[in-house]
Amino acid sequence: METKKRLLLKSLTWQATGFFAMGMISYVVSGSFTASLSIAAGGMASGFVFFFVHELIWAKVAWGRARP
């Protein structure tokens, strides 16, 4: 089982990666730096929350875990 600190750090690094990718894609599509930052920021905030909650839920599921 992971600690919440580790989960928080994983969530932050994952979202930073996603922010960069979403910013680049939305810039290519929109041609606007401001629009791409807005889209990426919204995606980052919602993605962080959903990932964190998703991991908390899965941490309670025993199915598929190897037993020590």
Image (cartoon, helix red, strand yellow):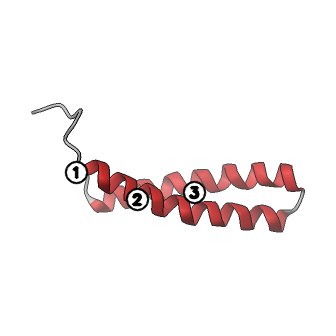
| Dot placed on the residue nearer the N-terminal end, 3 or 1 | 3
Q: Residues within 10 Å of mark 1 (few under 14, many from 20)?
A: few
Relative to residue 38, is residue 32 drawn left or right? Answer: right
Q: Earlier in the sequence, mark 2 or mark 3?
A: 3
Q: Which residue is mark 3?
A: 16
Contact check, label 1 and label 2, Cβ < 8 Å:
no
Q: Position of residue 18 (x, y in %)?
A: 60, 51
Q: Residue at x 38, y 59 (%)?
A: 53
Residue indicated by mark 2:
52
Name the residue: 19% across, 41% down: 62
For the residues labelled 2 and 3, the Cα–Cα distance comes to: 14 Å
Residue indicated by mark 1: 60
Assess whether mark 1 and mark 3 are in contact (beta carbons under 8 angstroms): no
Residue 34 pos. (x, y %):
82, 68
* CA distance separating discs 3 and 1: 26 Å
Q: For the residues labelled 2 and 3, say whether their Cβ atoms are less than 8 Å apart.
A: no
Q: Residues within 10 Å of mark 2 (few under 14, many from 20)?
A: some
Q: Amino acid at mark 2?
A: Phe
Residue type, mark 3 in image: Ala
Earlier sequence position, callout 1 versus callout 2: 2
Q: Is residue 35 left or right of residue 16?
A: right
Q: Extreme right residue here?
A: 31
Identify the secondary structure beneath mark 3. helix
**Which of label 1 and label 2 is nearer to you?**
1
**Quarter assignment of residue 46:** bottom right
Residue 36 image point, x, y percent: 78, 61
